[in-house]
Amino acid sequence: MTKKATVYDVAERAGVSIATVSRVLRQPDAVRPVTRERVLDSVAALGYVPSGSARGLAERRTGVLGLYFPGFDASEDAPVLDVLAGDQAEVPPFTVEQASADAGAPHPTMLFLDEVLRGAELEAWKQGFVLMIGVGRGDPARETVRDIAGRVDGLMVLAQSVPDDVLARLAQRIPVVVLSGPARGDSYDHVTVSNAEAMSELTRLVLAQADPGGLAFLAGPEDSPDGAQRWEGFAAAIAEAGIAADDVTVLRGDFTRASGRRAAEELIARGAPAALVAANDQMALGAIDAFRSAGIRVPDDVRVTGFDGIEAAALSRPTLTTVRQPMIDLGRAAVQLLARRLEQPDAEPMTVRLPLQILVRESSQRPA
Amino acid sequence: MTKKATVYDVAERAGVSIATVSRVLRQPDAVRPVTRERVLDSVAALGYVPSGSARGLAERRTGVLGLYFPGFDASEDAPVLDVLAGDQAEVPPFTVEQASADAGAPHPTMLFLDEVLRGAELEAWKQGFVLMIGVGRGDPARETVRDIAGRVDGLMVLAQSVPDDVLARLAQRIPVVVLSGPARGDSYDHVTVSNAEAMSELTRLVLAQADPGGLAFLAGPEDSPDGAQRWEGFAAAIAEAGIAADDVTVLRGDFTRASGRRAAEELIARGAPAALVAANDQMALGAIDAFRSAGIRVPDDVRVTGFDGIEAAALSRPTLTTVRQPMIDLGRAAVQLLARRLEQPDAEPMTVRLPLQILVRESSQRPA
DNA sequence: TTGAAAGCGCTAACAC
DNA sequence: GTGTTAGCGCTTTCAA
């Protein structure tokens, strides 16, 4: 690593002024071909890479968009790893384990975010931006967010991942887009999905296949806005079908596979229903496990549906009927909203609602 | 969005100099408490967020690390999405599909990178850095990579994702760490895994379970360095076991599930082997499909192993014996190497070799 | 077509 | 403890 070359170095070596160097890089046509070549040679020879900071400062825009996520993987207390300590020669090339199926699977929300990120990245590229990501960890999420906010032209945050007051302050400085979560009447741009409507439709599909008398709903934790919306959608659908709320068994889980298993066991104890609508895939899969253990067949004896469209839902036996979030498009839409607001800072706040995809698979269909 | 506040605004409102404002933010103890409070009030009132560009320029370091990946998801020709065109009211809240199991699954390499990214993010946070990501797309990968290089203090790149000459030039400006891939004798820091050794060990395990006479290897595409290393590891193990190369059937696939299926069909035509060692999970799973279709049981009739540790391998029936990449740790190690070099620019280039995890599951074990 | 020079917003000596 | 001031490396008028 030689000393970093600057415009001055390039200019001197090419025998021109720094202004010309800058022009060659930003508006090549405004420079005479001979001069341009000379400058480019100099750039190559010196291994010159323009400083993003200087550019950002001078242009008053960085060309970077930020994406802020909450940390879901308990990463604060991840095992220590220190590749610099100790002797590399002592590291074994491999370890052997009799492995259970689900060792170290990532948190589902992480998988969700991975795809959102991919969509954002794609669109950012199309629009000529680079992406900076930050993950919230521990208390001072406030720190990280602001740290990022200072370096970007616009910021995307997952709903509820940033305290309202912090978000409000940041929005004072740069455009903010809120991802997913309920579209509140605030002043940010939003991109969301129609949780409730999709759950209503899914419920209708289930009702068309199941004996209404034996319907059960497995709700998420009380503090989950998504969970709440899904419940609302379900409730609306049964009301519409003329089913009394009392005729439906409602249990509450915490979105984990284990809680789904427990709920199913309780249902079995009460007499298994004809259909179980779960507020997410994990719980649905757990329930299917429990049903199977009890000798109850899915979908023959009980129809089951999930929500989210995680990969395991596609690979399970039976394959799980579910609703898939348009994750890639969530990310892309967020970037589009940001790009728009960067161009029109004073446009009305906008909420984009993306369609969900109901995936009808084996678990919800009564055999012919 | 009011006009962005600067140090000058904050200073003026607090009745101090800009130096004091800067101090309050960077070394609070060097400022008298009263003054400090006054400044902080001003900061809050104005919604002041320091400019990363200005800071980066003045400090001559950005506090950002870059991560550059090749684009694997054919994203260039992703379907058009334009949330700004057309009327939002016309967007349906959902769509319904009779869904096959594997609609729109992400490219396995993407899943790999997602986890590497997560590890890098975690470690970056621990070390007080922020992460910037860039994905190579289309021809001018050179563009993107340089774009990023100009904005970061250090850069991590996936092996082979950046042309050698470009990488060499960037390394002239900032520290570079190469992720995965063969550790060449070049001047970068590397973090890799022991592909060959792990494959040797896996092969030994298989040999302990299978009739050596009927061994088959399903290789990856010729141009894959990983594939090559895995082949070497396999070859070494059979040589060590005194098995003649001619006694092993070697087929070549392209890492896809379909190619695994085809290979298995060919094997079946020639008379199924006692064991099939595949160079990755996808092909192994495809092969299992084909065996099942032909009424050949795994692991009873044929033992099968994969490589990579993708999620589908854990969920398949039978569960697939495989080798899992330490993806999180790859990301973390890369950041650690970068942090080290930032502190000691002239230290010897270092290669960190991370252990692979051999996951012994159902597909490779002859029933008792 | 090219050069000179004024910032962009911040940090860090160095004075006071 | 606090203020003054000189850069950091680049873009961009404005002149020449």
Image (spheres, coloured by chain):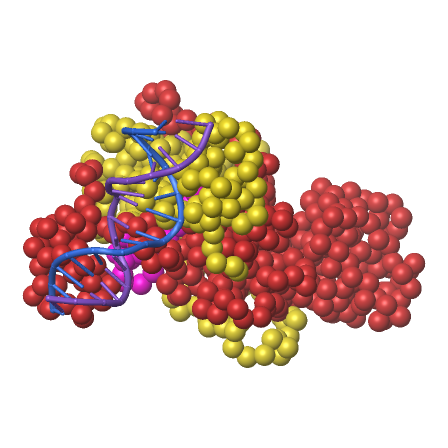
Chain colours: A red, B yellow, C blue, D purple
Q: Which residue range is magenta in the image?
A: B130-147
Q: Is residue A162 above or below residue B82?
A: above
User: At which x and y percent is residue B35?
Assistant: 52, 33
Nearer to me, B277 or B81: B81
User: At which x and y percent is residue B273?
Assistant: 42, 46
The quadrant of the rendering that contains the N terminus of chain A is top left
Residue B227 is covered by the magenta coloring? no
Q: Is residue B256 left or right of residue B83?
A: left
Q: Is residue A296 left or right of residue A313?
A: right
Q: Is residue B340 above or below residue A34?
A: above
The quadrant of the rendering that contains the C terminus of chain A is bottom right
Q: Residue at x 55, y 62 (%)?
A: A330
User: At which x and y percent is residue B80?
Assistant: 46, 72
Nearer to me, B21 or A183: B21
Nearer to me, A152 or A278: A152
User: At which x and y percent is residue B307?
Assistant: 42, 43
| Residue B316 seen in the figure | no
Q: Residue at x 89, y 66 (%)?
A: A243
**Image-quadrant location for residue C14:** top left
Q: Residue at x 70, y 66 (%)?
A: A198
